[in-house]
Image (cartoon, rainbow, N blue to C red):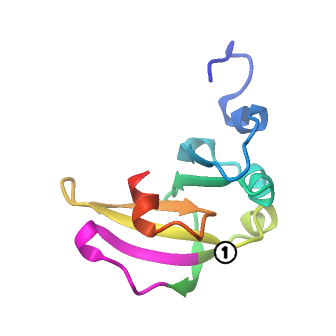
Amino acid sequence: MISDGKYHDNNLLDLLVFAPNAIYLIDKNYVDFEVLYRISYAEVFFILRKKSNLDNSTVERKFNIATATGLSMDKTVAHNWHRFKKLFPGPQRLVENDDRENEVGILFLTNNMEVSALEVAKL
């Protein structure tokens, strides 16, 4: 989306019309948990890179991870910070994929509990 620059980039999610059952890839710099919860409630899915300062707790860990594919973690999480709990009270899924070339783990947050962890990482 291209704007005239008078509208702050962080508010772009408010302008979009979301299609039900679609998966949107969102840059971590545009994270607005209130909007993400609203679109989750409308059965719209998102995948975004997790910000390093976002604190969460494990609700459920999945152990059937195909590590040969580069996956290292797939779990359901809840936010620890009261502000985020209030804005997004439901659980989210945290998937980690190892970038072996750069030797770092890439963390993805999503509200989609149905697709495989590998699909989350590939998108």
Looking at the rendered structure, the secondary structure element under dot 1 is loop
User: What residue do we see at 69% from left, 12% from top?
Assistant: 4
* Nearest the eye: 87 or 41: 41
* Nearest the eye: 7 or 20: 20
The three-letter code of the residue at mark 1 reads Asn
* Nearest the eye: 10 or 73: 73
Seen in the image, is 38 located left or right of residue 93? right
- Residue 98, located in which quarter of the rendered image? bottom left
Q: Specify whether residue 53 is in view.
A: no
Q: Specify whether residue 47 is in view.
A: yes
Would you name the residue on which mark 1 appears?
80
User: What residue do we see at 78% from left, 54% from top?
Assistant: 34
In the rendered image, the quadrant that contains the N terminus is top right
Residue farthest top in this picture: 4
- Residue 104 is situated, as x and y percent measured from the top left of the image, at 28, 60
User: What residue do we see at 58% from left, 61% from top?
Assistant: 110
In the displayed structure, would residue 43 be above or below residue 70? above
- Residue 58, located in which quarter of the rendered image? bottom right
Span shown in magenta: 62-76
- Residue 87 is situated, as x and y percent measured from the top left of the image, at 79, 61
Residue 71 sits inside the magenta stretch: yes
- Residue 18 is situated, as x and y percent measured from the top left of the image, at 73, 41
Q: How many marks?
A: 1
User: What residue do we see at 68% from left, 53% from top?
Assistant: 21
